[in-house]
Image (tube, rainbow, N blue to C red):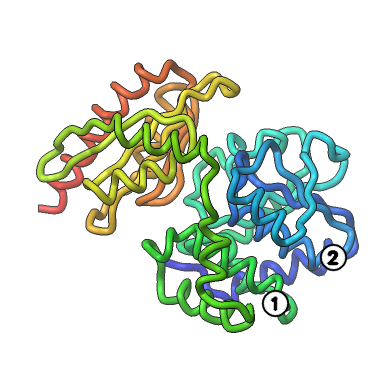
Amino acid sequence: MAVSPQLLRELFSSFYKEWKDKKLVFAMHRHADIDALASSYVLSTFFPKSIIAAPDEMNSQAKQLAQDYNITYEYLDDVDPHIPLVAVDTSHPAMLPQAASREVVAIFDHHQQAEDNLKSNFNIIDSEAKATAEIVALIAPEELDQKRSCLLAIAILSDTARFIDATERTLDTFVSLYKACGGTYVDILKEAFPPKPLAEKKAVLQALSETRFIRAGDKYIAYTKTGLREGEVATYLAEAGDIGLAFVDDEKLKATRISARANRHIDIELNRVMADIGKHFGGNGGGHKKAAGCIAPAPIDEVMVYTLKKVKAFVEENDNKAQ
């Protein structure tokens, strides 16, 4: 069940009273997306002494949004490690490695929780929210101006992939923000889904052209390797078949990243199977039921073989339980 807006507001109110006049760094997750950037920025506006920071390079959509809306941010490694940290749009240490050496005082997140997640005194978390921006809009301690309303509306539209996965609360929140935004829906849509750089177009098209698939009962699991935009690729594959898996050989992490997506017709807990796969390889995983991922410190081909076997068995087991 979703956490009530009232409870979220009460949790935020306690955090706000304690920290509103202190220095904070609102930290996004690795390869930060639009939701992480917009949520971090809007939260930082409530705390006058705060800054926002990214642990590494943001994705191209977030970079474009930062440019269009004049949002300045720092890299977390350049920020004084003594400044308390607020994790935004993540609660897992793998997605925010610098949190291990910093004091984490609050978490704002909408992803499914796991035992090894980050811990803080203020956990403003609702795993039923479809974007962290949805939570931020619900707990805002003051009326949001046009800029902040637009940013949160853009983030919700982006993170739900044009409302492929949304609740009535998500839609109501978006409409409220949209009305305060002052722009047109087309304006928001363009910011949520800006044109891809040439290299990203090539990577997505190449990944789709090399797609393979296996059958699990009456469902198809489509899979491919890619170097960029694995979440988008996995979503395309899920919509074309049933479940999409995109694998990335991450040289920096010395691991394989997996993005897993299921279409709207399947009731399956991909976050559970991704957590199991990550754990098997000594990594980690999680996310949402139909949009999950993991980091597996092993060669990509080895991870792919194991993942396909595991996901196929999971789908068939899930189908048997449903009968």
Q: Is residue 252 left or right of residue 21?
A: left
Q: For mark 2, give the secondary structure.
A: loop
- Name the residue type under label 2: Lys
- At which x and y percent is residue 171? 46, 75
Q: Is residue 278 visible?
A: no
Q: In the rendered view, tell whether residue 308 sits above or below residue 27.
A: above
- Distance between mark 2 and mark 1 Cα atoms: 22 Å
Question: Which residue has dot 2 on it?
Answer: 20
> In the figure, residue 275 lies in which quadrant?
top left
- Name the residue type under label 1: Gln
Question: Which residue has dot 1 on it?
Answer: 146
- At which x and y percent is residue 163? 41, 66
Of 36 and 224, nearer the camera is: 224
- At which x and y percent is residue 211? 28, 32
Q: In the rendered view, tell whether residue 246 sits above or below residue 39.
A: above
* Mark 1 Cα shell of 10 Å, populated few (<14), some (14-19), many (≥20): some
* First in residue order: circle 2 vs circle 1: 2
Q: For mark 1, give the secondary structure.
A: helix
Name the residue at 60% across, 74% down: 138
Name the residue at 51% across, 68% down: 3
Name the residue at 55% across, 77% down: 184
Q: Is residue 18 visible?
A: yes
Q: Which of marks 2 and 1 is in front?
A: 1
Q: Is residue 214 left or right of residue 294?
A: left
Q: In the rendered view, tell whether residue 141 sits above or below residue 127.
A: below
Of 104 and 56, nearer the camera is: 56
Q: Quadrant of the N terminus?
A: bottom left
In the image, which disc is placed on residue 101?
none
